[in-house]
Image (spheres, rainbow, N blue to C red):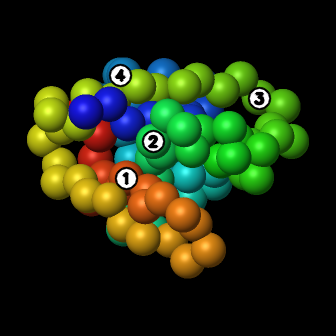
Amino acid sequence: MQIQHIALADSWAVAQESGTYTASTLGLDLAEVGFIHCSRPEQLDGVFRHFYAGVTEPLLLLTIDADRLTSPWQFDDVPGERLSFPHIYGPLN
């Protein structure tokens, strides 16, 4: 299954050097939130509009093969949302 995550290009560049990615969402880290926020492909437009529309620095769309993750992940219900969201409970390898 493929899930997606919007990343700041600078954060992704640092992760490529270190080997792990720990940004949870815009301005927050895995250590602060407890998981990395991800989306189903059909949720992506809403996430972008709600959280990233005003971001001026370069963004990347990460498409993640959930079967290759070394950290656990699951779908979690979010109040007010029709579909559950995928969350990764550890660093993204």
- Give the mark, 3 or 4, whose residue is nearer the N terminus: 4
Residue 86 image label: 1
Label 3 – label 4 distance at C-alpha? 20 Å
Q: Secondary structure at mark 1?
A: strand
Q: Secondary structure at mark 3?
A: loop
Q: Position of residue 91 (x, y in %)?
A: 28, 47
In this rendering, the label closer to the viewer, 4 or 1:
1
In the picture of the structure, the residue carrying the numbered disc 4 is: 17
Label 4 – label 2 distance at C-alpha? 27 Å
Label 4 – label 1 distance at C-alpha? 25 Å
The answer to whether residue 77 is seen in the rendering is yes
- Give the mark, 2 or 3, whose residue is nearer the N terminus: 2
Up-down relation of residue 36 to residue 34 (above or below) = above
What amino acid is found at the position of numbered circle 4 in the picture? Glu
Q: Secondary structure at mark 4?
A: helix
Q: Are marks 2 and 3 in contact (CB under 8 Å)?
A: no
User: In the depicted view, which residue is nearer to us: 51 or 17?
Assistant: 51
In this rendering, the label closer to the viewer, 2 or 3:
2
